[in-house]
Each structure stands twice: as C-alpha cells, then as structure tokens.
Image (cartoon, rainbow, N blue to C red):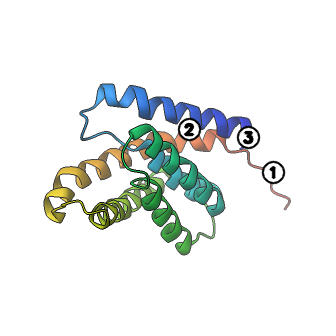
Amino acid sequence: MSRLSWFGFGLAVFFLQSSVLPFLFSSFWVPDLWLTAMILTGVIYRPQDMIVMAMAAGMIQDLVMGNFFGLHLFPYLAVAFVMTLGGREKYNRQWFVSMTAVMGGTCLYILAAAAVIWAAGGHIWPVPYLLHQGIPLIMMNGTAAVVMHYVLWELKHERESRW
C-alpha cells in the first residue's frame, strides 16, 4: 500500500472514529475502528506495520479522547505485541479469519485497558466492565472488521507470482 493510501485510510478512520460514529452510537458503545484497523493491518500486511499502526493509533486516540495519556497507547501496543508473537505464514483472504482475529484482539485490548485503568488507581469491577463495555465492543469491532477487511484488501497491491 502506498504512503498516500495509508494517509487517506488513516484520515478516513480518524474522521469516522471522531465524528461520525459518536453521532450514530451511544457514547459508551462506539466501535473502535483504530483497534480494528490495527489488527487487520497485522493480518493482511506485515506485523511490523501493525506495531507502527498501534503507536500512531494509540497516540491519536489518546489525544482526541482527552483521557489521560496511555489509556489507548499501552493496550494497543500490548495487543500488537501479543498478536505479532503468533506470527503468520500466509495471509488469508477470508473475512471470517479477519473477524476472528479482531474479536480476539479486542478481548486482549479489554484486558489490557482494564489493567491500565487499575494501575492508574481507577476503581474497576471486572465482571460488570466486561459485560457492559467488553462484549458490545467485541461484537461491534467484529462487525466493523468484516467491512474493513474488504476495504484493506482492495488497497493491497499484490504482485504477480514469479512461478
């Protein structure tokens, strides 16, 4: 994907995440398109791209949201690190692989975000947090992954096979 395509994709995600989705959804249950894009970047492109996307998306989310710095950055980096450990031999063009990866990554994100909130001194109850915040986010990110999967595959420039 060219740098211009990355920039345009990032601008589209930024606009949707900061303006359109908060208007369409309740303030508690907004899909996290940055997290979805980051995980799909690791599934479709190189794992190194996922680390770069995690740093950029985490900083953008923390600056736009206005919460304390690190609430998104550290969990995004933790998810990217864990997901790159698994590696991948070949990418898969099937949407359900992307959806499963995003739902699993969102579970990791929920746990990492709860750990950051707890480490910062916030009072968090794990079961209500999972039921109220986690499960809807997992479902919405999984649904967003299906749509975003096709967009990112269309932006991918594949070379012809040499053989």
Q: Are the residues flagged by discs 2 and 1 in contact, CB closer than 8 Å?
A: no
- Residue 72 lies, in percent from the top left, at 42, 53
Whether residue 123 is visible? yes
Mark 1 lies on a secondary structure that is: loop
As drawn, which residue projects farthest toward the bottom? 85
Whether residue 93 is visible? no
Q: Which of labels 2 and 3 is toward the front? A: 3
- Residue 20 lies, in percent from the top left, at 39, 26
Q: How far apart, in angstroms, are the residues tagged by discs 1 and 3?
A: 21 Å
Determine which residue is flagged by label 3.
Answer: 3
Q: Which of labels 1 and 3 is toward the front? A: 3
Q: Amino acid at mark 1?
A: Glu
Q: In terms of sequence position, does the residue under pointer 2 or pointer 3 come before the other?
A: 3
Q: Are the residues flagged by discs 1 and 3 in contact, CB closer than 8 Å?
A: no
Question: Looking at the image, which is closer to me, 28 or 139?
Answer: 28
Mark 3 lies on a secondary structure that is: helix
Q: Image point 41% across, 61% down: which residue?
A: 105
Number of other residues with Cα within 10 Å of mark 1, as a class: few under 14, some 14 to 19, many 20 or more: few
Determine which residue is flagged by label 1.
Answer: 160
- Residue 145 lies, in percent from the top left, at 44, 46
Q: In terms of sequence position, does the residue under pointer 1 or pointer 3 come before the other?
A: 3
Q: Is residue 2 above or below residue 85?
A: above
Q: Is residue 132 above or below residue 21?
A: below
- Residue 64 lies, in percent from the top left, at 44, 37
Q: Amino acid at mark 3?
A: Arg
Number of other residues with Cα within 10 Å of mark 3, as a class: few under 14, some 14 to 19, many 20 or more: few
Q: In terms of sequence position, does the residue under pointer 2 or pointer 1 come before the other?
A: 2
Question: Looking at the image, which is closer to me, 135 or 93?
Answer: 135
Q: How far apart, in angstroms, are the residues tagged by discs 2 and 1?
A: 20 Å
143 left or right of 48 in image: left
Determine which residue is flagged by label 2.
Answer: 151
Q: Amino acid at mark 2?
A: Val
